[in-house]
Structure formats: structure tokens, C-alpha cells
Image: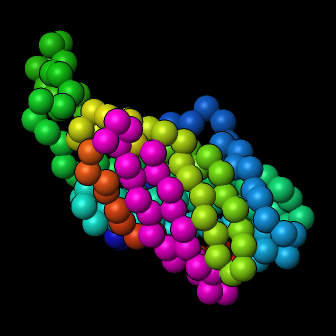
Amino acid sequence: MKRSRIVLALALATAGCSSAPAPVPMAGAPADIGQIAGEWGGEYQGDTSGRSGSIIFQLAAGADTAYGDVVMFSHQREPSRLPSQDPSAGLPIARTPDVLTIAFVRATDGGLEGRLAPYRDPSCDCVLDTRFQGRIHGDVIEGTYISQPRGGGTAQNGTWKVKRKKA
């Protein structure tokens, strides 16, 4: 993803929220949580969904609550799920990126796992439950995620990567 798109995603996420990113409860031993202290930014790519987006995450040293969001860009939408047209302008209504909430993160043994708050998938119009995991490599965390539709259906998976921002 181009840097300008990441900047745009972060700007849209900030503009679309009436406040700071959502609080994220942290679990794990203090030393494990300490490994992910700092400000992180990166992106994810859906292997099966074609979606991509940005990730922001911030954890103050010694804190047990972080702050962060995931911004989702949907590239594939079913024609039946496209927004209706604006009758006053006769043009399609642009769909804005969706800001997803990181619900929980557990740090353990050089890695982390967590989940997003359930959200509505724009292509199937169903609710997804998403879990993620990753490994910490210094100032980089890389991992995978899986999103499962509630009530059954085909799971979606992908990869993600964030880098710690230098002060």
C-alpha cells in the first residue's frame, strides 16, 4: 500500500471518530506487555476478501490499556450492496472506510493475540468475528487473522504488519 494511502486512511479514521481511538484492554505479564509499548502503525491485507486497510495502536509504558483502531477499505462489493443513489444529485453516494474497534489484546512469550469487536461485513451483509495473532520482532509485529461469519459460512483470512514509530 502506498504511503499516501496510509496517511489518508489515518486521516479518515481520525476525522470519522468523534474522539480518540477506542480503549483496548491488555492482558499478559508486565514484561510481555512492555514489549509492545509505543506507537505502532501498519496495514493488513485480506487474502480471501480482497480488503485492506490500516492499523494504529498505542500503548504507554506501564499501562494496561492501549488505544487503537483498524480502518477497513472494501474493494469488492456486491452490486446489490452498493449504496443507493442520491436523488438530488443523481450520483452514487460514496462509501467511506469503516473504522473497526480492537476489542482485546493478550501479550505472551514474544507474541500477541486478540480480537476485533464484531462488525458487519460489507460484501455478505453478515456479522464477522475476527481473531488475530502475531509475533514481535523488535520494532515489527507480523501476524495473521481469521474472520468467521456468525451463523456459519466461509471464513476469511489475511495477514497484517505494524511497525513501532521512532520518537
Residue 38 horizontal/vertical position (percent): 74, 69
Q: Position of residue 93 (x, y in %)?
A: 23, 28
- Is residue 36 visible in this depiction of the protein? no
Hey, which quadrant is residue 37 in on the image? Answer: bottom right
Residue 130 belongs to magenta span = yes
> Which residue is pictured at 84% across the width and 69% down the height?
29
Q: Main secondary structure of the magenta part?
A: strand
The residue positioned 39% from the left and 53% from the top of the image is 147
Boundaries of the magenta span? 129-152
Identify the residue at horizontal 10%, vertical 35% (top origin).
79
Q: Where does the C terminus fall, quadrant-wise?
A: bottom right
Q: Is residue 61 left or right of residue 123?
A: right
Quarter of the image that includes the N terminus? bottom left
Q: Quadrant of residue 150?
A: top left
Vertical placement of residue 19 versus 68, above or below: above
* Residue 82 falls left or right of residue 132: left
Examine the image and state in which quarter residue 27 appears: bottom right
**Residue 165, percent across and down?**
65, 74
Rendering colour mode: rainbow
Which residue occupies the foreground of this view, 78 or 111?
111
Spot the residue most to the front: 152
Q: Tally the marks.
A: 0
Any part of residue 156 in sight? yes
